[in-house]
Amino acid sequence: MIYLDTSVVLATLLAEDRVPPASIWQHTLVASRLLAIEAWVRLNAKGLGASHAELAGGLLGRIAFVEMERPVLARAHDPFPVPVRTLDAIHLATACYLRDQGQPLKVATFDERMATAARSLGLDLLDLAAD
């Protein structure tokens, strides 16, 4: 199972220089419901909501979303081993929640701060340079 950070989805939607390997979309993908909100907010802010709606809907439709329920939000409220941004805290708390429920997962992110925080929590990272 792969936990997707928003940076991976946005890199794909916005055709950035760095994109995840195409094979990533063949795996079981999971993320916080926050990812969908972040993706749409970014697309709309760039004026791309309408032109990218089909692509965004297709990508987001491949992801199993974890709702921001009490246990996830409670973990996000607790201290982290390294400083984290608010939205990253929710993503990391979601990944930790899944891991603690016995779900083996790797975190996929292009965000170095997120990667550092994930490693500090003992979460495995997916190598996005490999295909």
Image (tube, helix red, strand yellow):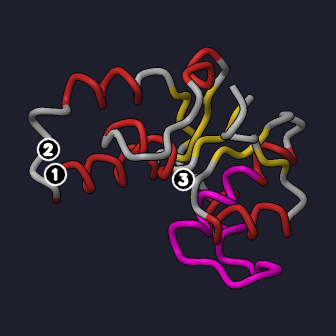
Q: Are marks 1 and 3 in contact (CB under 8 Å)?
A: no
Q: Quadrant of residue 1?
A: top right
Residue occupied by mark 3:
68
Distance of mark 1 from mark 3, alpha carbons? 22 Å
Distance of mark 1 from mark 2, alpha carbons? 6 Å
Where in the figure is residue 66, as x and y percent of width and height? 58, 40
Please check the rendered image and state whether residue 84 is part of the magenta-colored stretch, yes or no: yes
- Residue type, label 3: Met
Q: Which mark is residue 44?
A: 1
Pick whichever of labels 3 and 2 is earlier in the sequence: 2
Q: Is residue 88 above or below residue 38?
A: below
Span of residues in magenta = 74-95
Where in the figure is residue 23, as x and y percent of width and height? 62, 19
- Residue type, label 2: Leu
Distance of mark 3 from mark 2, alpha carbons? 26 Å
State the residue at coordinates (56%, 49%). 5
* Residue furthest front in the image: 17
Q: Secondary structure at mark 1?
A: helix
Marks 1 and 3: which is nearer the front? 1
State the residue at coordinates (36%, 54%). 38
Where in the figure is residue 4, as x and y percent of width and height? 59, 42
Q: Give the crowd class for mark 2: few <14, some 14-19, many >=20 residues within 10 Å.
A: some
Where in the figure is residue 13, as x and y percent of width and height? 33, 37
Please check the rendered image and state whether residue 103 is part of the magenta-colored stretch, yes or no: no
> Where does the C terminus fall, quadrant-wise?
top right
Q: Are marks 1 and 2 in contact (CB under 8 Å)?
A: yes
Residue occupied by mark 2:
48
Q: Secondary structure at mark 2?
A: loop
Q: Secondary structure at mark 3?
A: loop
